Amino acid sequence: MLEGVLSSRERRAAVRAVRSVSKLVPGFLPKLRAQSRRELLWQNKEQLQALQILEKQIKNPKLDVAVAEQIQSSLRGVTNWNAKSPTVSKVRRLLRLVPQSSDLQILDALCTGAWDLDSRADLDTDVKTKSVG
């Protein structure tokens, strides 16, 4: 269902669908106990499925600029950039795939607060300096 909404022409609904899918990416951190191996495997599978849905949208030639900005912003929200996990690796790869148009860069500059920029500190420099297409 969310994949259908993501592909719709309704910009507002598509942006909200990105937000919903993106909530699965950072994962769950229990406060009172360590996660079991089974929980971690299940969580990684769920996160990778969510990222696969976002990847499909990134590769959509008709990707709306507002949806692209929301995807990019959500992917930047991953906090543990130093983790060696399949999720973080895929997030890094997807950030490089987001098509950087002039419109996206302008929208991103308007929508991204200074407090959101810290999470990008560990990203590869090619993501930050990608040329405008």
Image (tube, grey):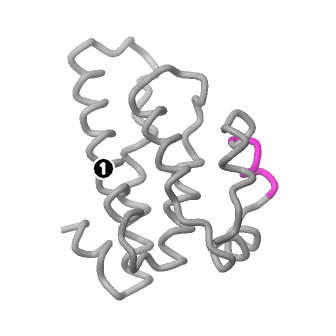
**Relative to 32, does residue 120 appear above or below in the rendering?**
below
Q: Position of residue 64 (x, y in %)?
A: 47, 79
**Relative to 131, does residue 11 appear above or below in the rendering?**
below
35 horizontally vs 2: left or right: right
**Relative to 80, does residue 124 appear above or below in the rendering?**
below
Q: What residue is pinned by disc 1?
A: 52
- How crowded pointer 1 is (Cα within 10 Å; few <14, some 14-19, many 20+) is rated as some
Quarter of the picture containing the C terminus is bottom right
46 horizontally vs 72: left or right: left
Decide which of 63, 9 is in the foreground and name it.
63
Identify the residue at horizontal 54%, vertical 50% (top origin): 95
User: Which residue is the extreme one toward the right?
Assistant: 114
Identify the residue at horizontal 75%, vertical 53% (top origin): 129
Residue 116 lies within the magenta run: yes
**Image quadrant where residue 102 sits:** bottom right
Identify the residue at horizontal 62%, vertical 73% (top origin): 101
Identify the residue at horizontal 22%, vertical 73% (top origin): 4
Q: Position of residue 85 (x, y in %)?
A: 43, 24
**Chief SS of the magenta region:** helix
Decide which of 32, 40 is in the foreground and name it.
40
Decide which of 87, 131 is in the foreground and name it.
131
SS assignment at label 1: helix
**Relative to 30, does residue 46 appear above or below in the rendering?**
below
Please provide the residue range marked out in magenta.
114-119
Amino acid, disc 1: Gln
Q: Position of residue 9 (x, y in %)?
A: 34, 88
